Image: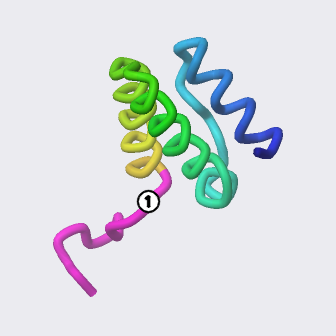
Amino acid sequence: MTEEACKALDRLREGSPIECSADAYHLEIRDALILFALDCADSNDAVRMRIALAEVNRLDNEHGYGVSVAAPNSLT
């Protein structure tokens, strides 16, 4: 795990929102957050899992991950 991803997870553990560039999010932070959520699910920590997934959702919306921000109803 990179230093950027470790800092992001530390902010999440502190209860602070993660602030990062779109490149850092797409390259490393998103994967680290999802793995953290899976680890939380494995240890029956549903609260932290939901917080991590909510942060993934927020950052997906902020950085335009997945569905196109310009045309969210268009499949092409």
**Residue 55, position as x, y percentages in the image:** 44, 34
Left or right: 6 as drawn, with respect to 20? right
**Residue 24, position as x, y percentages in the image:** 69, 52
Query: In front here: 76 or 15?
Result: 15
Is 32 rendered above or below residue 68? above
Query: In front here: 21 or 44?
Result: 44
Is 26 rendered above or below residue 45? below
Q: Residue at x 17, y 71 (%)?
A: 73
How many neighbours does mark 1 have within 10 angstroms: few (below 14), some (14-19), or many (20 or more)? some
Give the amino acid type for the residue marked by disc 1 in the picture.
Gly
Determine the residue located farthest toward the bottom in the rendered image: 76
User: Where, quadrant-wise, is the N terminus in this rendering?
Assistant: top right
Q: Residue at x 40, y 19 (%)?
A: 45
**Residue 48, position as x, y percentages in the image:** 43, 21
Is 11 rendered above or below residue 70? above
User: Where, quadrant-wise, is the C terminus in this rendering?
Assistant: bottom left
Left or right: 35 as drawn, with respect to 38? right
Tell me the magenta residue range: 63-76
Left or right: 9 as drawn, with respect to 56? right
In the rendered image, residue 72 lying in the magenta stretch gets the answer yes
Q: In which quarter of the view is residue 57 placed?
A: top left
Q: In which quarter of the view is residue 18 placed?
A: top right
Residue on which disc 1 sits: 64
Is 30 rendered above or below residue 36? below
Determine the residue located farthest toward the left in the rendered image: 73
In the rendered image, residue 38 lying in the magenta stretch gets the answer no
